[in-house]
Amino acid sequence: MRKRARSPIISPPGATLRLSRRRVLGFAAGACAVLASPAVRAQVASRVVVIGGGFAGASFARAVKREDPGIAVALVEPRTHYTACPLSNAVIAGMRDMSAQHFGYAGIEADGIVHVPQKAVRVEADQRRVVLADEVRLSYDRLIVAPGIDLRFDAIPGYDAAAVEQMPHAWKAGEQTLLLRRQLEAMADGGLVVISAPANPFRCPPGPYERASLIAHYLQAHKPRSKILILDAKDAFSKQRLFEAGWAALYPGMIEWVGLSFGGGVTGVDPATRTVRTEFGEHRAAVANVIPPQRAGAIADIAGVADRTGWCPIDPVSFESRLVPNVHVIGDAAIGGAMPKSAFTANAQAKACASAVVALLHGRNPGEPKLINTCYSLLAPDYGISIAGVYSPRDGLLAEVEGAGGTSPLDATGAERAEEATFGAAWFDTITTEAFG
């Protein structure tokens, strides 16, 4: 099969080049080093560009490099470190330091992957190029889009980018996480904490309920007369029976959940007074945590891989976009069928996609993947629950393999709950090491 002639992996615009010359030369030198490798000296290296340095993008970059060291890989991520969302609820509850959530990209660079600290602003799919903020262009044979989520500030009347200073979402870990923690610390005993949970799909389906649990743990110790109200835009949620049993055992009378049919849908907010409105009335909160609906990160729309839902339809075998050829979408941004949006899912999809991309670059058909997701949730430092599932392609989507998953038993002992909490911490250490080194 005749190979298409390749242009350089970086094409400067010819004027000024704001991306540091050293990094550009390093990128070019990395490609030359690949070409000089005895195993691939006779051929030009394939080029893969990854947009997004979270669990999906970082895991993919390392996985594809492990499978084929001859592939030149660039990870486009403007941040110098990634702040992980898993376990960030423990930061909010004062159980964990924020520094434990930070992960750099030195391990990725040590694998021969070039970290490009720029923002991708455009994808020229017909030319197979990614355009950076300073107009530097990165050429690719395959592009991986892993932008995570953006928050839909247009979805709740009164809630916008400015409102997050009064009513934090804390759904992207970082300063918002710490803001919500500070508001809880400043709240008087007896105050009402309102959590607004969105309709599906959204990042980390059990997350709002783990958050309520760990906030309750903090309040029980420091402000025991306080209450938590969860206003939900749906009538059921992930691991519901396990959460409700845990709340009854650990925090009796402290947490109230209101589903959509009973007035849980939020119809508007007033950030100035921290008032949350529903069709059934208003709730004046001492602390209001508003988690709005979400969509794929903005570059997905710019690249043309997001559809009218705001999410990205994919082929469930290769994760290639159904809208733009030679572009693959993984992680939270992808329409994953039955597979939830989680860090475990992002990591699993990244590894499956890496195998598919290597096969495609070598002219082979990708094998059909089987993907696993396990989600641990903490209700207290020594009380964990989990849900697991196995997924495979069916009817154009990722479907759950019947009978292959399950949840923690409702009648588990205290020792078993403590063991699950330990498993959750070990999982976090494993997945962050696998993604970031």
Image (cartoon, rainbow, N blue to C red):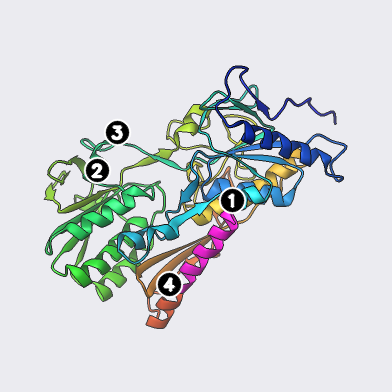
- Mark 4–mark 1 Cα distance, whole angstroms, equals 29 Å
The residue under label 1 is which amino acid type? Ala
Q: Residues within 10 Å of mark 1 (few under 14, many from 20)?
A: some
Q: Where's residue 410, x and y in %?
A: 38, 74
Counting residues from the start of the chain, the first of labels 3 and 4 encountered is 3
Q: Where is residue 400 in the image (x, y as percent from the top left)?
A: 53, 56
Q: Earlier in the sequence, mark 2 or mark 3?
A: 3
**Which residue type does callout 3 highlight?**
Asp
Query: Which residue does the numbered mark 1 point to in the structure image?
Result: 106
Nearer the observer: mark 2 or 4; the answer is: 2
Q: Mark 3 points at which residue?
A: 154
232 versus 431 height, above or below: above
Q: Distance between the residues labelled 2 and 4?
A: 32 Å
Kindly identify the amino acid type of the residue bearing the numbered disc 4. Answer: Ala
Q: Main secondary structure of the magenta part?
A: helix
Question: Are the two marked residues, 2 and 4, in contact with CB atoms closer than 8 angstroms?
Answer: no
Which residue is label 2 attached to?
Answer: 165
Look at mark 4 in the image and give the residue it sits on: 421
Percent position (x, y) of residue 382?
Answer: 37, 75
Q: Which range of residues does the magenta coloring cover?
A: 421-437
> Residue 178 or 55: which is nearer the viewer?
178
Q: Mark 3 touching mark 1, by CB under 8 A?
A: no
Residue found at x 65% / y 44%: 113
Q: What's the distance in space between the residues labelled 3 and 4, CA to CA? A: 37 Å
Quadrant position of residue 207: bottom left
Cα distance in 3D space between marks 1 and 2: 32 Å
